[in-house]
Amino acid sequence: MIQETVTVIVPTYQEFDSLPSLIEAIEKVRNESIPNLEVLIVDDDSKDGTEQLIANLQEDWVTLMIRTEDRGLSPAVIAGLETANSKFVAVMDADGSHPASAIPDMIAALNEGADFAVGSRYIKGGTTEDGWGFLRWLNSKIATIMARPFTKVLDPMSGFLALKKSTFENAHELNPVGYKIGLELIVKCKCKIVTEVPIHFSTRQLGESKLTLAVQWQYLQHVIRLLRFTHPALVSFCTFACVGLSGAGVYVLLNFVTSKMFASDAISVGIAAWLAMTWNFIWDRRYAFWNSHNRSIICQYFGFVVICAIPLLANYFITLHFAKSNSIPMAALFGAGIGSAIGIVFNFLMTRLLVFGK
């Protein structure tokens, strides 16, 4: 028997049909293994009868929290983790896909020194129900590969997890996007020892799946946020370089347009260079230096122009030089290539330090 206190957090939205069997399964664990277990259901104002269902149970170990603002699975889990007062906290889905019988093994792993426990489909002994579907399986595998920079866990996408409340309290700047809160907690709580407990992952029997294209897009955004947290300088530079590459393409395209509008090569190339530089500034400020919006955009723009002046002028004169013997778009391609090679590292370091620095 596990004598420590445990709170099982169950985020719900429109899960009325699934809750009775889930609570019954958790009650069995409570009776057989963890007498000091309680359940906290965090519902996003479903208005589907969940509130009356819990009231009718009249069980003091089952609590319901109704949320009406900032709704979403990850915010609901965080709200539950903040509210729980037990030594250990666990999170599981309400749809029956996670077996409550695995909770004692997950708590035991924490007692044995793990920082984090995951109910895993992909380690030895873990399984998924037949009929899961190739596309869903493929989606899960791709998502797991995308999580590899942060953890070696085989099933980091699992929503079935457990940790100490004290570990959660040490989390740094929780800012999840979408529904995969587990990966966020592993990274932001700086969990070094993550133990995977094998589970059988069942296909949802009741209700509708929350796995949509929008959710998958949110997961991609989440991975980018985590990369910014763990490798901010590298992500900033790679994004800066990608924006610079796109700017080179814009520069060539603009030269094709402006050369048709102005008879003077000097004017057409100059306008194209200025517009391409402005393009770079807009996207660098938004993506490469995502945390720099605490300063005036006008001051940042003029600072960006000053710092980029040297490679920009190189780009400008190289383009004019090659324009004497080539078409303007071809000359612009030479100018963009050489100018980018000259300026990419210098521009990145100077703009990061002097323009977009906090």
Image (cartoon, rainbow, N blue to C red):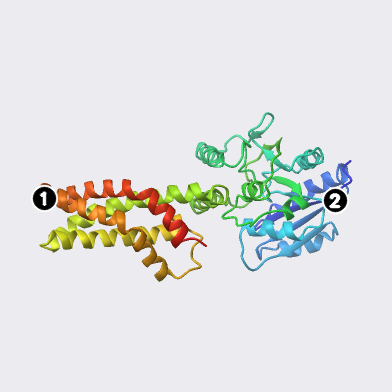
Q: Earlier in the sequence, mark 2 or mark 1?
A: 2
* Disc 1, SS: loop
Q: Position of residue 92 (x, y in %)?
A: 70, 48
Which residue is tagged 1? Answer: 324
Query: Residue lying farthest top?
Result: 124
Rendered location of residue 97, percent (x, y): 66, 44
Residue under the image location 27 percent in, 62 percent down? 274
**Residue 1 location, quadrant:** top right
Mark carried by residue 5:
2
Q: Does residue 16 appear anywhere in the picture? A: no
Task: Tell me if 151 is positioned left or right of 234 in this view.
Answer: right
Name the residue rendered at 49%, 46% in the picture. Answer: 234
Q: Is residue 11 left or right of residue 221?
A: right
Residue 74 falls in which quadrant of the image? bottom right
Give x and y (percent) for residue 294.
Answer: 51, 67
Viewer-closest of 250 and 137: 250
Q: Which amino acid is tagged 2? A: Thr
Instruction: Count neighbours of disc 2 (C-alpha within 10 A) and say few if under 14, some if 14 to 19, many if 20 or more.
Output: some
Given residues 201 and 274, the one toward you in this image is: 274
Q: Nearer the viewer, mark 2 or mark 1?
A: 1
* 221 lies left or right of 283: right
Q: Amino acid at mark 1?
A: Lys
Q: Residues within 10 Å of mark 1 (few under 14, many from 20)?
A: few
Q: Visible in this render: residue 348?
A: yes
Secondary structure of the residue carrying numbered label 2 = loop
